[in-house]
Amino acid sequence: MVKYPLELSNIDAGYGEAQALWGVSLKVREGGINVILGSNGAGKTTTLRVITGILKPWRGDVKFLGENIVNVPTHKRVDMGVGMVPEGRRLWPQLTVYETLELGAYTKHAKEKFEKNLELVYTLFPVLKERSKQLAGTLSGGESQMLAIARTLMSSPRILLMDEPSLGLAPKLVIEVFKVIEKLKKETDLTVLLVEQNVYMALQIADYGYVLEHGRIVLEGSREELKESERIKKAYLGL
Amino acid sequence: MGLSTVVISVVHGVLWGIILGAASTGLTLLWGVMKVVNVAHGEILLIGSYLIVILYAFLGLSPYIGLLASLALGLITGLAIYWGMLHKLVGKVEKVTLKIEMSTLLIMFALSVALSNSYYHFIGSEPKGLGLWHFGLKSSIDIGSVVVRTNSILAAIVAVIIVAALHLLLTRTTLGKSIRAVMQDAQAASLVGINPVRIKMLTTMIAIGVTTLSGFLIVLHETAIIPGTALIYTPLAFVIVVLGGLGNVLGSFIGGIIIGLIYGLSKAIIALTFNPLASAPLALSTAFIVLILVLLFKPEGLFGR
């Protein structure tokens, strides 16, 4: 039986007067790589902001592990297991790599698993171990993305949200990042929700996906279904 | 004769600089971390100074007890300032805009006037101090050819302890790292489970607590204080904080020493070449010329990145 640790139902959300999401409903499948695809401005980041609590939706529910978390503040959602790799990395430039990882494990339950998680991120990203004393602001684009992912992994999340991890990276590094996501799926039982503009790459690793257009879900399906869809082929893959 | 004037001025300048540096760390935290332009800094310093004087004069309590009391009162005052004034302005915002920063300046300006008028009304404009109380056996000692008051030496020692403690807090503890993280990106901090509001509240408490605690340094170093003492320490703290780089505690400390040194040197030069009576106020002006130069040529501060 498929389990859904995270469910959005009928989410309307926006900024000020401007509505960005209309009745968005989606279910994130446990233990798999879920993707939300869509072009710039489709509402992908807004959806993640609603899930993390940075943005409060106008209407609708966010259920995490069966509990409605719509009124739970962001920092408490992290404690519950919502981990987010924000768009643009959002690192603290004047903290060292090691300090960043320490703060990643800020919550009580993450502190208990500090050693174990540190080992995991150093295995996934050996370069971070080499650079542990370096300031985060001095890392290259690829290394920064690794650190952003590692920081979130240190919080021991049940679900890993990733906002455009490939944005602004050279093609070689994009492949690297996607390899890491696949590796994570294999080596941990983490549930991933990935938001991507890079539809081609995302469809290589996705188990299930949704397509957002102008703030509405217009399509959903398994990887095969999405790959076969005329809409995807035409609008996103240029076939 | 000329050389000894220079040596005396430099020694006193550096001692004062150490005190100034420590007394400015509260401002660098509040401004650098919270984006609160605390123009009431000098008046808040005097909360601590006056508390120590009052406890000593009326209750006969030792200034060491006053020192702890001023820290305690500062932490409580910080809590009140956060929830009463700052939370609405900077508590929940993701990024403090220039407009909000200007609002913090105005609200702190209002606080400075309120405090200043209260000092005049309740304490009066006469100089207040610790009278004959002094640290150690004698009230002054000779270091080579320089006579130094033992109270100033005690103030400098406490100043170094304050700066070291604050530096260790910010670099070695989870709270300190969280404070730095919130300062650099509050949203990213909330995404690892840090409650930015709680951190901002604690930062305000620590910043105000360190400031009132530094009131101890001021009352010891300035044999007597008046409400107007704040008018020297507020602008000097701003010079030092800009020089040291916003939010940089060690930078502020070194900035303080530099300002003290510049003050001492220019005072000696003015006294020797121009007019001894004019040397103190003109030397103070020199310190502000440094502020102008730093803002023009190195606005991120001497140690800014």
Image (cartoon, coloured by chain):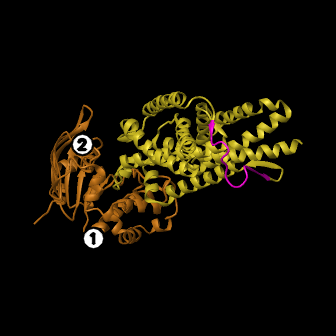
Chain colours: A orange, B yellow
Describe the element under mark 1 as helix, strand or loop.
helix
Q: Amino acid at mark 1?
A: Lys
Q: Residues within 10 Å of mark 1 (few under 14, many from 20)?
A: few
Among numbered discs 2 and 1, the one appearing first in the sequence? 2
Task: Return the chain for callout 1.
Answer: A
Q: Quickly name the residue at label 2.
A: A56
Q: Quickly name the residue at label 1.
A: A186
Instruction: Choose mark 2 or mark 1, whichever is in front.
Output: 2
Q: Amino acid at mark 2?
A: Lys
Question: Seen in the image, is A177 located left or right of residue B283?
Answer: left
The foreground one among B31 and A60 is B31
Task: Return the chain for callout 2.
Answer: A
Question: Seen in the image, is B27 located left or right of residue B257?
Answer: left
Total tally of numbered discs in the picture: 2
Q: Is residue A180 above or below residue B49?
A: below
Q: Is residue B255 visible?
A: no
Q: Is residue B46 magenta?
A: no
Q: Is residue B140 magenta?
A: yes
Q: Residue A55, how many percent across, how many down? A: 27, 43
Magenta part, dominant SS:
loop
Q: Is residue A201 above or below residue B221?
A: below
Residue shown at the point (26%, 47%) measured from the top left: A53
Q: Residue A103, how many percent across, how many down? A: 40, 59
| Residue projecting furthest to the right | B1
Q: Residue B70, how many percent across, how many down? A: 51, 46
Question: Seen in the image, is A231 located left or right of residue A181?
Answer: left
Extent of the magenta region: B128-142
Describe the element under mark 2 as helix, strand or loop.
loop
Marking on residue A12? none
The foreground one among A64 and B107 is B107
Question: Do callouts 2 and 1 point to residues on the same chain?
Answer: yes
Q: Is residue A36 visible?
A: yes
